[in-house]
Amino acid sequence: SSRQALEQARAAAEELEDLKAVAKGLEEENGELRRQARHMEKEQRSLCLRAEGLQEEVRLGPRGCPGGAVPRRTPAPLCHEQNQRLLVEGQGLREQIQAQAARVADLEVSAGGGHSGLPVGQCR
């Protein structure tokens, strides 16, 4: 009877050690996920700032002219090329922000729902 109790105690001690190892691994994984989430949030803020800069550039128009007025010395094809570049770059930023938001959402689900307070997929 005491032999069975000793065996049970050993088995319980081994199980406890296994659970401690699993808990430590989960804590390390959680720390890595939090680090990745912080990095992604910084990247998302950076993308938002770039997108806001592009919006301001588009709002001001070519060469910073309010209302999209074109200075007389600016050839029309240049303005069209600049607008196309801005549109393409803006679309690329929107896609990057959406992808970033999806990655942040995946991390939040993996990490148990910790949220940074930023709206997912949106700038401010």
Image (tube, helix red, strand yellow):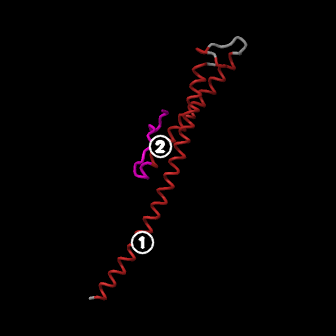
Compared with 80, 124 (above or below) is below
Which amino acid, by three-letter code, is at mark 2?
Ala
Which amino acid, by three-letter code, is at mark 1?
Asp
Residue sitting at 65 percent across and 23 percent down?
82
Residue 117 at what x, y percent from top left?
43, 40
- Residues under labels 2 and 1: Cα distance? 34 Å
Q: Quadrant of the N terminus?
A: bottom left
Query: How many marks overall?
Result: 2
Residue sitting at 69 percent across and 18 percent down?
77
Quadrant location of residue 43?
Answer: top right
Q: Does residue 117 show up magenta in the picture?
A: yes
Magenta residues, dominant SS class: loop
Residue sitting at 49 percent across and 51 percent down?
34
Kindly identify which numbered label has been placed on residue 18: 1
Is disc 1 surrounded by few (<14), some (14 to 19) or many (20+) residues within 10 Å?
Answer: few
Q: What secondary structure is found at the residue carrying circle 2?
A: helix
User: On the image, numbered disc 2 is attached to which residue?
Assistant: 102
Residue 92 at what x, y percent from top left?
57, 34
Q: Which residues lie in the magenta part?
A: 108-124
Is disc 2 surrounded by few (<14), some (14 to 19) or many (20+) residues within 10 Å?
Answer: some
Compared with 117, 108 (above or below) is below
Q: Earlier in the sequence, mark 2 or mark 1?
A: 1
